[in-house]
């Protein structure tokens, strides 16, 4: 939950809902800047660079804004690369970190001039055979660290599909040597929502050890996983402490390596989670024998995190903020169990009231779908105090757009 001074007010959000309709995602651009500056400050004692992991939110206006801050871009699909280029990112500031894609997709990214991060032996060998040292690459390693808020977002453990195991170092070395690959970066990303600063330190120590096998390195990339608070008292990654401890360790390592390296990160959630608000309208209050349900005009097709990850999003009634507090279970309109929050204390909710979900910027709209043939919501960006529509709500035509009528 962002600090109160950072938060868009209930009145303001109600105005947006009335102007643009609901459900609507609202992004507060300046909050992204604040978060970016926090990272820069925390790592100001070392040579650090940040690449926004745009899988969290790819609206082109958000990408353009993040580019204007001087931040790089981390992408996982060729389409994200293309969106990044359209948004104006220099290819030199884009990292491509895909997983389980074929060589063609890697070559397509190479042809666009972006940095390539390879995460399996098969592609490493194929890429080396084809391009040798002519196109430098980065290697994603799996350090075998169990980290992250839950199993679905843990990516650095022994059973994870991500990265090349550190125990396959001899195999990597053989391929690099025989194909003359030029490896300029080592990467790891152990998971999302990592509270414990020491997990990053353990990870970086492993990469320092691995770095000795690669004479051409220019950067070490620690991915991301910075946890933000989703409610009052929720633990967060202590960015200042992390910055201090990692910078010390990194600066120390840099004294011994062949040349000074840069330290890279790929924050997604940290940059855009708190900038986002998801505003919905109450369709119906349904009292059953056990529960008072608030049924809203949205569902897990628009915000899947609660159902998919058991994630908590703080919900508030913004159109009756002084109403008596009551206990409600907030559900969506999807024809499946579709619960946003159980037993939430909300100011009395009446049919027609607007509710807001906080921290909805990351993995909100981006993971939305048209399940139940529902329309995807609109997106609005607030910059310099001005709300602007940055995505129209879907229409029925959008549902039919790619369908082919053969009758
Ligand atoms: C390789 C990589 N980098 C960065 C991120 C961003 O993580 P977060 O949103 O936790 O900052 C992810 C998330 O899945 C990732 O897989």
Image (cartoon, rainbow, N blue to C red):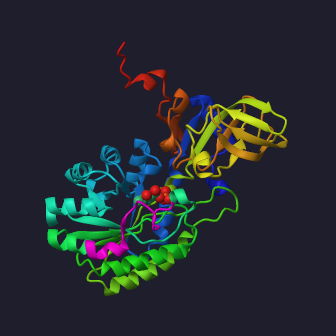
Q: Is residue 134 visible?
A: no
- For the N terminus, the quadrant is bottom right
Q: How many marks?
A: 0
Please name the residue shown 35% across and 20% down the image: 404
Q: Residue furthest bottom?
A: 256
Image height check: is 89 above or below 23? below
Q: Position of residue 212 (x, y in %)?
A: 30, 82
Left or right for 176, reference 17 = left
Q: Position of residue 339 (x, y in %)?
A: 67, 41
Left or right for 136, reference 251 = left
Q: Is residue 100 visible?
A: yes
Q: Position of residue 354 (x, y in %)?
A: 69, 35
Please name the residue shown 75% across and 41% down the image: 329
Provide the residue span drawn in magenta: 154-171
Q: Nearer the viewer, residue 92 or 78?
A: 78
Q: Nearer the viewer, residue 318 or 184?
A: 184
Please name the residue shown 60% across and 31% down the image: 22
């Amino acid at each position: 939950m962002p600090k109160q001074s950072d938060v868009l007010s209930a009145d303001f959000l109600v105005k947006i809902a009335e102007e643009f309709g609901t459900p609507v995602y609202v992004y507060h651009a300046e909050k992204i800047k604040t978060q970016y500056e926090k990272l820069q400050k925390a790592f100001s004692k070392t040579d650090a660079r940040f690449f926004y992991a745009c899988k969290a939110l790819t609206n082109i206006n958000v990408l353009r804004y993040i580019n204007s801050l001087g931040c790089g871009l981390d992408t996982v699909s060729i389409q994200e690369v293309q969106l990044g280029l359209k948004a104006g990112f220099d290819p030199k500031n884009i990292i491509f970190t895909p997983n389980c894609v074929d060589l063609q997709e890697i070559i397509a990214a190479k042809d666009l001039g972006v940095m390539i991060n390879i995460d399996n032996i098969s592609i490493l060998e194929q890429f080396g055979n084809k391009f040798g040292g002519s196109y430098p690459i980065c290697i994603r390693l799996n350090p075998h660290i169990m980290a992250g808020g839950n199993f679905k977002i843990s990516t650095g453990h022994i059973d994870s599909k991500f990265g090349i195991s550190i125990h396959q170092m001899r195999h990597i070395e053989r391929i690099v040597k025989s194909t003359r690959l030029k490896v300029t970066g080592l990467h790891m990303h152990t998971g999302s929502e990592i509270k414990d600063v020491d997990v990053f330190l353990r990870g970086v120590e492993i990469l320092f050890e691995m770095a000795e096998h690669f004479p051409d390195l220019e950067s070490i990339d620690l991915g991301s996983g910075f946890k933000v608070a989703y409610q009052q008292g929720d633990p967060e990654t202590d960015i200042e402490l992390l910055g201090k401890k990692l910078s010390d360790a990194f600066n120390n390592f840099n004294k011994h390596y062949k040349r000074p390296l840069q330290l890279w990160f790929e924050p997604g959630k940290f940059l855009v989670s708190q900038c986002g608000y998801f505003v919905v309208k109450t369709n119906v209050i349904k009292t059953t024998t056990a529960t008072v349900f608030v049924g809203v005009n949205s569902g897990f097709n628009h915000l899947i995190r609660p159902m998919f990850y058991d994630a908590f999003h703080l919900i508030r009634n913004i159109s009756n903020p002084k109403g008596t507090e009551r206990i409600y279970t907030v559900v969506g309109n999807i024809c499946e169990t579709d619960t946003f929050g159980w037993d939430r204390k909300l100011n009395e909710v009446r049919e027609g009231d607007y509710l807001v979900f906080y921290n909805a910027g990351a993995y909100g709209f981006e993971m939305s779908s048209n399940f139940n043939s529902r329309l995807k919501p609109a997106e609005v960006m607030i910059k310099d105090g001005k709300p602007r529509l940055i995505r129209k709500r879907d229409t029925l035509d959008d549902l039919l757009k790619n369908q082919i009528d053969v009758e």
